[in-house]
Image (cartoon, coloured by chain):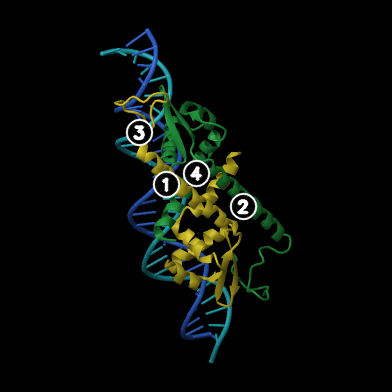
Chain colours: A yellow, B green, C blue, D cyan
Amino acid sequence: MTPTQLAAVAERFKVLAEPARLRVLHALRHGGRHVTGLVADTGLQQANLSRHLQQLYAHGFVVRSRQGTFVHYAIADPQVFALCDLMCGQIERAQGRRRANRPARRAPVATDPARRPGGAGVNR
Amino acid sequence: MTPTQLAAVAERFKVLAEPARLRVLHALRHGGRHVTGLVADTGLQQANLSRHLQQLYAHGFVVRSRQGTFVHYAIADPQVFALCDLMCGQIERAQGRRRANRPARRAPVATDPARRPGGAGVNR
DNA sequence: CGCTTATATTACTGAGCAGTCATATATGAA
DNA sequence: TTCATATATGACTGCTCAGTAATATAAGCG
C-alpha cells in the first residue's frame, strides 16, 4: 500500500463522508434526475447542491448529460451503494456488540489477564 | 433514510477518510499491535498516532487492552477491510472507464442526442 | 437581439480537524 | 517513593471545506 494509494482511497471516502452528498446519491439510487428535481428531493439549496454535484462528478460517482436547459445526473457505478450498505451493516453490528457488552460489565477493558477493580485503566 | 442515519454513516466514512488512519488499520490487518509498534510501522508521531487511535476506538473500529505499560490495539470488525477493498475496486474500475472513454473523444458529454461541436457544453 | 429558466461559479465566513510541542497520566521496577 | 517507559491530552496553528449570497454562464424561445 503506497502512500499515493492510501491518499486516493481516503480522498474517495471523504466524498462519501458528508450527509448532503449521501442524500444526493440516495436520491439518485432509483434513477437519474435533473438538478431541479434534486433540489426538490434533497432540500439542499441550488448553489450548495451544485457544488456537491461537481464533487461527485469530479470523483466519478455520477455521470451527467445535458438535456436542453436541464442537466441530468445519474449514478456512475451502482457499487457505491454496496459501500453504503456495508457501512450500515457495520453500524448495526457495532451497536449490537455494544449492547452485548454492556450487560456484563461496563466496558470491560483492563489489564489483560486479571482485572483490578480500583485501577484507573485505559477507559475514561 | 433519516437525516440521523445519514449523519451516522457519513461520520463513519469520515473516520476512514484519512490516510493516516487507513495506515493504522492496514498495520493492524494481520494482527494486533502495541502503540510503540504502530509508531514504528506507520511512521506517525506518537502524539498524532494516539489521537488517531482514540478516534478509531471511539468509533468502534478497533478494540484495546492494557498489557503492562503497553496498550494493545486490534481490529474490532474485519469487515472494514471489505469496505477498503471495495473502494479500491471502484477506483480501478473508474480508471478503466476513464481510459476507455479517452481514446474516443475527450469527455464526450454534451447535449444528449447529438453533439454540437462548437457549443460550450457541460464540460470545463 | 432580449427575456426567461436552469445550472455553475466566485468570494466570503465560520467550523472542524490534522499535526505538533509540551506536559500529564499510567504502570512497573528499583 | 523515585525513576523510567508508555500512552494520552491540552493548547495552539494552519488548512480544508460546507453553506450562503450574489453573479455569471448556458440554452431555448419570441
Same chain, labels 2 and 4:
yes
Disc 4: host chain = B
- Within 10 Å of disc 4 (Cα), the crowding (few <14, some 14-19, many 20+) is many
In what quadrant of the picture does the C terminus of chain A appear? Answer: top left
What residue is shown with label 3?
A123
The residue under the point 54% across, 70% down is A33
User: Element type at marker 3?
Assistant: loop
Q: Going by the image, does A13 lie left or right of D4?
A: right
Q: CA distance from mark 1 to mark 3?
A: 19 Å
Image x and y of residue A21, in percent: 48, 59
Q: Quadrant of residue D11?
A: top left
Look at the image and tell me whether residue B58 can be seen.
Answer: no
Extreme front residue here?
Answer: A104
Tell me, yes or no, whether dots 1 and 4 are on the same chain: no
Q: Position of residue C4 (x, y in %)?
A: 46, 83
Say if B14 sits above or below B120 in the image: above
**N-terminal of the two: label 2 or label 4?**
4
> Within 10 Å of the Cα at label 2, are there few (<14), some (14-19), or many (20+) other Cα atoms?
many
Query: Which residue position holds label 4?
Result: B18
Residue holding disc 2: B90
Residue indicated by mark 1:
A95
| Count of numbered tags | 4
Q: CA distance from mark 3 to mark 2?
A: 38 Å
Three-letter residue code for mark 1: Gln
